[in-house]
Amino acid sequence: MGLFERVFKPSDAAGSVEADPIIDRLVGATDRRLTYVKGYRATLRGPVLAARERLRQAVALIPGPAEVSAAAWSRDDTVRSLFAKAADVPLAFGNDPGTRAWFDAHAGCDCIGMLALEKRERRVLTSALQGDTVQAEVVRTTVSFTEPQILAPGGDEAAVRAQLVQRALEYLALRALQRVGAMRAEKHELEKERALLQAQLRLAESKGAGFAGLAGGAPRAEIEKELERTVSELEAAASRQLLPGLLGAMIDALAKSEAYLTIEPGAIAIDSMNFAVDAASPQAIVPKVAILKLVNRGPFAVLIARFPRAELRTDNRLAEAEKFL
């Protein structure tokens, strides 16, 4: 039996052991009623395992682990590119509730997690050196990194990367749930449209009763055609009942994961002032990051980071606010 058959064979015992815990997690994150759909596990096993393998390969592209700290800021071009000041670095993980909780539960250990910063580009007018001449009002692109977030804090790199794969699978399942919600809203709108068209058709069939002749409106044949289209769309929507529709949407999202989530090697080249430059430029700094793009957010510069306990800091304003929670 070839690799393809082993991956997609629903009855494979090893596949069940690997896939079923993931399926349970996806069902828990979306709609637990999926367990009522006959054969849902067998249906999901192949797509789940195939998507997991693709996501493993994608997560493996994220560089690290690298130390992210105030001390590293002075010696590491990547950390210095991502943070404007050394003092900002420990606050990035000290202000993160998940990371602080991990530190609280694991005394004496450093923390590892995925650091993500939103990458923003802006076109500005500035002066620039062209050969030996300073040229005014040159259009250049600045690259900034904002809103640091930490995902999957843990104790070792392998566990963090495994958790990121799980989170990516959940993200795909939630996108499927979002699609089904949109289909339900569309069905509701179609039902309202059908009711309106039926009312218009009854008015047209009344042959001018009351003030119908003055009211105008579309010809009867046109109304019938529009009503037929609406009923057809409603029948199609009804054939995709919520739970089977969600199951189908999940399979589709898992199979087309690149349409919702991509991780690519970083191709960012900037100078010490965070202006975009050619990678071959002597001033070029190439941060060791990957680029994460989500269908509804991003792009993000990401790396696997090690956060030293010795530099754990919390913004005083955050600490004061938490006293009142």
Image: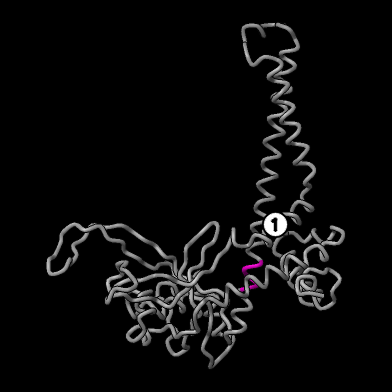
> Residue placed at 75% from the left, 33% from the top?
232
Q: Position of residue 10 (x, y in %)?
A: 83, 68
**Colour scheme in use:** one colour
Residue at the spot 49% in from the left edge and 82% down from the top edge: 64
**Residue 153, located in which quarter of the rendered image?**
bottom right
Q: For the residue carrying disc 1, how many other residues have a C-alpha within 10 Å: few (<14), some (14-19), or many (20+)?
A: some
What are the residue bounds of the magenta stretch? 165-169
Give 306 or 263, whichever is nearer the viewer.
263
Q: Is residue 285 above or below residue 173?
A: below
SS type, badge 1: helix
Q: Which residue is mark 1?
A: 252
Q: Is residue 33 above or below residue 71?
A: above
Q: Amino acid at mark 1?
A: Asp
Q: Is residue 146 above or below residue 65?
A: above
| Tally of marks | 1
Q: Please, which residue is most extreme toward the left here?
A: 133
x, y (%) of residue 261?
A: 57, 63
Q: Foreground: 320 or 131? A: 131
Quarter of the figure with the N terminus? bottom right
Q: Magenta: predominant secondary structure element? A: helix
- In the image, is 94 to the left or to the right of 25? left
Is 274 placed left or right of 218 in the picture?
Answer: left
- Which residue is found at the position 69% from the left and 20% from the top? 223
